[in-house]
Amino acid sequence: MNNKLNIKELADILKTNKSLEFQYKNLHYQIFESSELGYCLNVYSSNDKDENGDYLDSNLVDGGVCTGSAKDAVEFLL
């Protein structure tokens, strides 16, 4: 499967579910639709989560906001 197809599949999942989590190159990625603008993007060094199922802030490597489409948000992280 080529890279463009993978990005399209991830973007389709994000559009449908309003959120997406995946692992790529030993990092853990989280994208979710913002209630205010676009998508929130977070990258974690570990998939450890708290009792509520949220990633631990102590493992946050990078984060940001993408105001584009679901495809833009996936491409931004990768």
Image: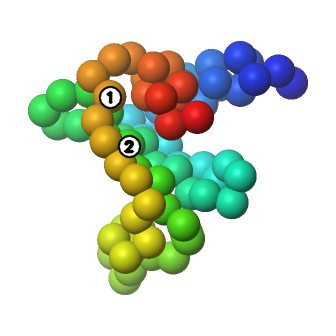
- Dividing the picture into quadrants, the one containing residue 34 is top left
In contact (CB < 8 Å): disc 2 and disc 1: yes
Query: Which residue lies under the disc numbered 2?
Result: 41
Residue at left offset 56%, top offset 57%:
28
Closer to us: 30 or 25: 25
Residue at left offset 73%, top offset 18%:
5
Is 67 located above or below residue 52 in the figure? above
Percent x, y of residue 16: 46, 28
Percent x, y of residue 56: 38, 74
Element under disc 2: strand
Quarter placement of the N terminus: top right
Q: Is residue 53 visible?
A: no
Number of the label disc, if any, that sits on residue 47? none
Q: Is residue 54 left or right of residue 26?
A: left
Residue at left offset 13%, top offset 32%:
36
Amino acid type shown at disc 1:
Cys
Quarter placement of the C terminus: top right
Number of the label disc, if any, that sits on residue 66? 1
Element under disc 1: strand
Q: Is residue 37 left or right of residue 7?
A: left
Q: Residue furthest bottom?
A: 51
Percent x, y of residue 4: 71, 17
